[in-house]
Image (cartoon, rainbow, N blue to C red):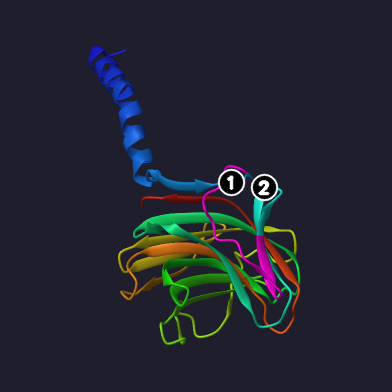
Amino acid sequence: MNPNRFLILLLLLSLFPLLTACGDGADAPGPLLFAESFTLGETADWQLERDALGQTSMRDGALHIELFGPNIMQFAALPDEPFADFVLQVEARQLRGDLGNSYGVLFRMQNNQEFYRFEITGNGMYMIERRNGDGTWTRYVETWTDHPAINQGLNVTNVLRIEARGSEMAFYVNDVPVQEIQDTRYTSGTIALDAGTFVQSDMEVAFDNLTIRQP
């Protein structure tokens, strides 16, 4: 072999780990800000509620939301952990109830009336909207919209991901991009996991393996 070529080959081999590390770093997740596996005795201070229409509880290594009436929404909030820019990911499964019911994530919550909401249904639709202080909703999708990335049915897992950077927000289901929006109303706030019924009552959803990282 030509000596010069041999030296060039050695140089390229020595640089390969550095080049690989640089390439991986571009897509590597940021530092972990928060993680929750919903293991009893090891959970954060979630607000769990129970009344005649629904309840939130932790069991079997998951956060469960159960609803017993039509046209209601219930959520479990993490009130003492505000986040501004983040990448949130959580696994969710609908265990029972009509597939037209919904479940998802509330984020950048100012209070129980002001927040953003990313929601999917058991029959494959999604919605992104903002809850305003006067009780109205601002939708970023004209209507509930079908998306093939959403796994349909009961006892199937959907992985929801939200990437929020300032006014820019991107939404994914099972690693597939669903939609991007821009909005400046809420720049930081707390999070919650939620479920909602429409006409049909009796619903249960389980959430697990929640992580929040820096973008």
Report if residue 122 is visible in the image. no
Residue 167: percent from left, percent from top: 31, 69
Q: Tags 2 and 1 in contact by the CB under 8 Å rule?
A: yes
Locate residue 15 relative to residue 71 in the image: left or right.
Answer: left
Q: Amino acid at mark 1?
A: Ser
Q: Is residue 92 magenta?
A: no
Residue stretch rendered in magenta on the structure: 41-56
Which residue matches tag 1? 37
Tell me the CA gap for discs 2 and 1. 7 Å
Residue 127: percent from left, percent from top: 53, 76
**Number of marks in the image?**
2
Q: Amino acid at mark 2?
A: Gly
Residue appearing at x 38%, y 64% in the figure: 189
What secondary structure prevails in the magenta region?
loop
The numbered mark at residue 130 is none
Structural crowding at the residue carrying mark 2, measured as other residues with C-alpha within 10 Å and reported as few (<14), some (14–19) or many (≥20): some
